[in-house]
Image (cartoon, rainbow, N blue to C red):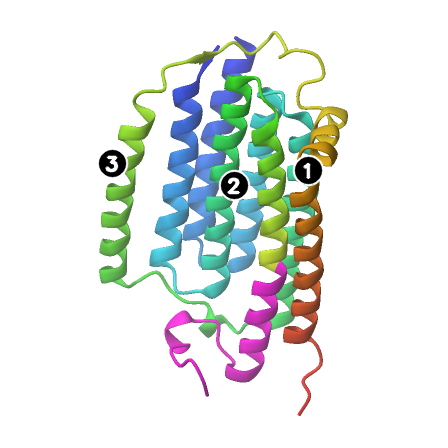
């Protein structure tokens, strides 16, 4: 029962904060709401007993990615005129139509999934803990892991090339 | 007991909020945040199915998605900074030329 209450509370919190994140005018406020959304998703991961992923969610998303956003927003030093308004009606209409179309697709996809997840009893053994995820990551998924390492290296180099000192 | 359906619905709603934000907002930074939101919605669906099937593989995939998001954010924000230096704007409507 407690898990259910937790789940519905944090699900509502994540939806509300996601909505506020995309509708606020000021990007800094948006980032703060998005951090709130990431934290509530991390709580839902804990409820689903994906403990390691919840920790990674907080560390990588809330800690690294969104902090990077905040740094960039501060660095850009936006004047108030540059922060765009939400006034384009045509775009809002297109957004609504796209949302309805996707909703329809998702609805037909989700309709069949009527399973129940009984949450209090943990899944077998050390499900979702760092040891189990790590073992899987370094045995079965070791080549994707190495490729991901190369990708991150390329991303670092690319970011330095793009945003580094301007060579005039 | 939580229905798998409600988890998937939450994931779908977050994804749709992300899509709407991406389409309606003209601020590059907020469009980028909407993309992050969509990636997170996908992660949530992966974790829900991981719990449902008692299999850890989707969690590993979710880890890869997070690493991909980190790489994407690093490059994307670098592009935004570079564009802002040259054009002094972050409004997507002002950035229509492929070359200037």
Residue in the image at 38% along x and 36% along y: B13
- Marks 3 and 2, how far apart at CA: 20 Å
Looking at the rendered structure, whether the residues under marks 2 and 1 are on a common chain is answered as no
**Residue A73 seen in this snapshot:** no
**Residue extent of the magenta highlight:** B74-100
Q: Look at mark 1 in the image and give the residue it sits on.
A: A56
Whether residue A136 appears in magenta in the rendering, the answer is no
Question: Percent from the top left, x then y, of residue B53?
Answer: 52, 18
What's the CA distance linking mark 1 and mark 3?
32 Å
Disc 2 and disc 1 in contact, CB within 8 angstroms: no
Q: Secondary structure at mark 2?
A: helix
> Separation of disc 2 and disc 1 at Cα?
12 Å
Q: Is residue A48 left or right of residue A125?
A: left
| Crowd band around label 2 with a 10 angstrom C-alpha radius: few (<14), some (14–19), many (20+) | many
Residue at image x 45%, y 84%? Answer: B99
The residue carrying mark 3 is: A104
Q: Which residue is mark 2?
A: B40
Q: Is residue A118 above or below residue B48?
A: above
Magenta stretch: dominant SS? helix
């Amino acid at each position: 029962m407690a898990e259910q209450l937790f789940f519905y509370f944090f699900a509502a919190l994540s939806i509300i904060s996601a909505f506020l994140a995309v509708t606020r005018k000021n990007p800094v406020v948006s980032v703060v709401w998005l951090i709130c959304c990431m934290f509530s998703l991390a709580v839902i991961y804990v409820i689903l007993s994906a403990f390691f992923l919840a920790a990674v969610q907080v560390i990588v998303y809330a800690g690294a990615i969104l902090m990077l956003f905040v740094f960039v927003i501060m660095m850009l030093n936006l004047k108030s005129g540059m922060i765009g308004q939400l006034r384009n009606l045509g775009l809002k209409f297109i957004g609504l139509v796209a949302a309805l179309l996707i909703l329809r697709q998702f609805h037909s996809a989700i309709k069949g999934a009527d399973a129940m997840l009984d949450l209090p009893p943990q899944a077998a053994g050390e499900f979702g803990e760092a040891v189990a995820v790590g073992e899987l990551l370094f045995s079965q998924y070791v080549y994707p892991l190495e490729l991901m390492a190369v990708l991150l290296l390329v991303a670092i180099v690319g970011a330095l090339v793009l945003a580094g000192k301007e060579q005039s | 007991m939580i229905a798998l359906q409600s988890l998937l619905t939450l994931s779908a709603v977050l994804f749709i909020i992300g899509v709407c934000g991406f389409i309606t907002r003209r601020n590059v930074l907020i469009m980028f945040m909407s993309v992050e939101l969509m990636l997170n919605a996908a992660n949530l669906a992966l974790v829900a199915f991981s719990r449902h099937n008692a299999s850890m593989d989707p969690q590993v995939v979710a880890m890869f998605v997070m690493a991909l998001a980190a790489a994407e954010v690093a490059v994307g924000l670098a592009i935004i900074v570079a564009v802002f230096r040259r054009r002094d704007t972050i409004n997507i409507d002002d950035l229509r030329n492929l070359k200037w």
